[in-house]
């Protein structure tokens, strides 16, 4: 960037900043304080409980899902081709087995003159040798088949997980806010794993069954056409029964996967909000809600397993019926001198089993196949969600943005029927410090959501340096902004990495300078591992105030043109707040700063204070001017500091 070799503007006067302090380095969609925030500053956004959406979700087209899944599997085309060839070899070798067994049986003949059985041992030895060779090759190819099947299965899982993770990273903040995070994780883990299991267990089996069907049909026809036609009697009945059962059972497998996602979401909320649950004594209520979802999953899982298990016995009964018919007619033709031998009957019986195998395979693996297809549908639903739109075409870098901001006739609502902003107008000049105050739900955080394009406007325009922000690439826009949220987001990594998140190219000297500016250096130095201290998830091994200081250090190192502070000092003590305020005043110098404030003592030095009420600005001015007017700001101030009821 053009100012990369300059010191950041407005750094504290004591000492000089390191050389090469970088300019804006915020990764796209990852402002300094963490990811986006929903309506009213709450994570999770609008949209009501996920359960309402899940109950409305309907099964999608099985054929379309299967076709898409085959395309994903087909990415490993060379391994897939090798697997198909290996399965073909195994199938052909297995098909010769009944014929050789029949020939072996026919080496035993009844000598009518002596009424004794004779055995052609020479022929039997040759046949047995062929069988040993055949079975040895079959075992070798089967082992190779299992290796290839595992390879394709894991490659498919790898591709689907990577595609899904990349897709989630391209979704808009509004889209992810409207989805339960536990459900997204369930699709990434459980659903993908179910697809993996089905691919590893079913693809070889089903393809082999199809080849076996064709091969068995050929051998049966070459042996006796009439007995083959008899074997066909049960086929239409088998297809009818399997189709009816499949249609009836499929909904339970889809419902099972949806409930599993809902259950994961409930667990995630419980873990994240555990302190709040305990503080309000809601353990019993939370357990009851979990039990309700878990009970629904239990019942649905039992139904899916029970009804899924019906298919196997039904198919086995029809297969055994076919076996009896083939045996009866085969014996009849042998007795009536049609030329069939005991060996032929034995071969026909085995081929009839193989002939019926494809339908039995589908029946016996129906549960895993349907679970996989239901999971694949849920994965593809995310994959089909439109990416975050970025129509920005301006060829401009973040370092070229000066920081003039203008909001014109802004209208927006998270829910169409409930507008939050109703024709808001606001002008912010470069380097100004603008404080935004108002009652909860007045739209303070919404302004930031719209400026960063986490959400899109319903009406009006936002300009940065006289450029419509829709013309700016989102990466450029977000690289020019650093945000410090009230709810700090830290990652399970070292303190150094968490600070450097604001600028991946920052040097060690710059990291320590940012920590010093944010007043975080003292507590970091007291830690046994210092900057190499590894944080637990969410930074829970630090205090709230310490986490806030790291988020501020992250914003310092980003060196943005536009700085957004969403009650950035709310989680620190009064003494620390005073130090941070001094650092913030220096950091905000010559930068456009938007300060969302609930604690009004933190904004007395703001150039302009904007008061929101009912989705519009009702007052503007500095602290003294607004107090003198004795209007809405004065009411908020007196209510907060003098205890006067509004």
Image (cartoon, grey):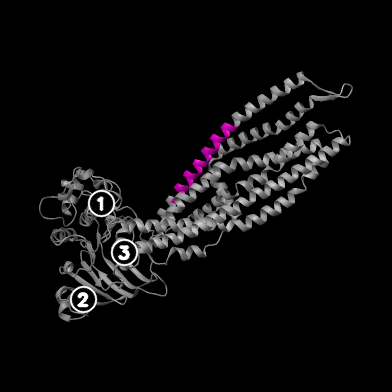
Query: For residue 636, which numbered disc appears in the image?
Result: 2
Instruction: Give the mark nearer the N terminus: 2 vs 3.
Output: 3
Query: For residue 393, which numbered disc appears in the image?
Result: none
- Is the residue 622 above or below the residue 203 in the image? below
67 with respect to 593 (left or right): right
Determine the CA span between mark 2 and mark 3: 32 Å
Quick one: 177 or 266, which is closer to the camera? 266
Q: What is the secondary structure assignment of the residue under circle 1?
A: loop
Could you tell me residue 476's position as x and y percent? Answer: 33, 56
The image quadrant that residue 391 belongs to is bottom left
466 with respect to 523 (left or right): right
Q: Is residue 145 magenta?
A: yes
Q: Residue at x 72, y 44 (%)?
A: 320
Q: Mainly helix, strand or loop, the magenta region? A: helix
The image quadrant that residue 31 belongs to is bottom left
- Is the residue 346 above or below the residue 121 in the image? below
Determine the CA span between mark 2 and mark 1: 43 Å
Residue wearing tag 3:
281
User: Of circles 1 and 3, which is in front?
Assistant: 3
Residue wearing tag 1:
2
Magenta stretch: give its range.
Answer: 142-164
Q: Residue furthest front?
A: 115
Q: Can residue 364 be seen in this snapshot? A: yes
């Amino acid at each position: 960037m053009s100012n990369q070799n300059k010191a950041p503007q407005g750094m504290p006067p004591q000492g000089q900043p390191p050389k090469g302090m970088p300019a804006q380095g915020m990764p796209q969609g990852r402002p300094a304080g963490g990811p986006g925030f929903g309506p009213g500053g709450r994570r999770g956004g609008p949209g009501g409980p996920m359960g309402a959406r899940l109950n409305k979700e309907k099964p999608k087209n099985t054929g379309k899902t299967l076709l898409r899944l085959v395309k994903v599997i087909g990415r490993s085309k060379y391994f897939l081709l090798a697997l198909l060839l290996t399965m073909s070899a195994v199938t052909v070798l297995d098909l010769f087995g009944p014929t050789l067994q029949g020939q072996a049986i026919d080496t035993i003949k009844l000598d009518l003159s002596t009424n004794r059985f004779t055995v052609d041992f020479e022929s039997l030895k040759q046949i047995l040798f062929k069988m040993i060779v055949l079975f040895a090759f079959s075992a070798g190819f089967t082992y190779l088949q299992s290796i290839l099947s595992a390879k394709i299965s894991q490659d498919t899982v790898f591709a689907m997980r990577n595609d899904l993770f990349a897709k989630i990273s391209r979704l808009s903040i509004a889209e992810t806010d409207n989805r339960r995070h536990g459900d997204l994780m369930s699709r990434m883990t459980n659903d993908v794993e179910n697809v993996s299991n089905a691919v590893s267990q079913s693809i070889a089996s089903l393809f082999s069954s199809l080849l076996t069907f064709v091969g068995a049909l050929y051998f049966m026809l070459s042996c006796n056409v009439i007995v083959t036609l008899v074997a066909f009697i049960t086929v239409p009945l088998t297809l009818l029964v399997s189709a009816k059962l499949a249609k009836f059972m499929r909904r339970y497998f889809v419902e099972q996967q949806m409930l599993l996602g809902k259950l994961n979401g409930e667990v995630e909320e419980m873990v994240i909000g555990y302190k709040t649950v305990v503080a309000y004594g809601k353990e019993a209520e939370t357990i009851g809600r979990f039990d309700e979802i878990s009970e629904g999953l239990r019942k649905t899982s039992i139904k899916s397993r029970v009804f899924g298990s019906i298919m196997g016995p039904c198919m086995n009964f029809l297969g055994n019926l076919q076996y009896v018919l083939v045996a009866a007619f085969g014996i009849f033709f042998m007795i009536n001198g049609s030329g069939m031998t005991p060996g032929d009957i034995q071969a026909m019986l085995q081929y009839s089993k193989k002939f019926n195998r494809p339908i039995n395979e589908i029946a016996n693996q129906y549960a895993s196949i349907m679970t996989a297809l239901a999971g694949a549908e849920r994965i593809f639903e995310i994959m089909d969600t439109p990416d975050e739109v970025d129509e920005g075409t301006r060829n401009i870098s973040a370092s070229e943005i000066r920081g003039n901001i203008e909001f014109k006739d802004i209208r927006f609502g998270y829910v169409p029927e409930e507008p939050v902003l109703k024709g808001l107008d606001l002008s912010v000049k470069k380097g100004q410090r603008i404080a935004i105050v108002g009652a909860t739900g007045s739209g303070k955080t919404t302004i930031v959501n719209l400026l960063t394009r986490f959400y899109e406007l319903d009406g009006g325009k936002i300009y940065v340096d006289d450029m419509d922000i829709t013309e700016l690439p989102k990466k450029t826009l977000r690289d020019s902004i650093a945000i410090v949220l009230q709810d700090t987001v830290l990652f399970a990594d070292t303190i150094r990495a968490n600070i450097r998140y604001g600028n991946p190219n920052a040097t060690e000297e710059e990291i320590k300078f940012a920590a010093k500016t944010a007043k975080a250096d003292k507590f970091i130095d007291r830690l046994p591992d210092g900057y190499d201290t590894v944080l637990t998830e969410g930074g829970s091994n630090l205090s709230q105030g310490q986490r806030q200081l790291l988020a501020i250090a992250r914003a310092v190192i980003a060196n943005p043109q536009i700085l957004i502070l969403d009650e950035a000092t709310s989680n620190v003590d009064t003494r620390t707040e005073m130090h941070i305020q001094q650092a913030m005043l220096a950091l905000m110098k010559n930068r456009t700063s938007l300060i969302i404030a609930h604690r009004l003592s933190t904004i007395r030095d703001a150039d302009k204070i904007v008061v929101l009420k009912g989705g519009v600005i009702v007052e503007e001015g500095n602290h003294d001017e607004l107090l003198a007017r004795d209007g809405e700001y004065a009411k908020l101030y007196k209510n907060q500091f003098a205890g006067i009821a509004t």
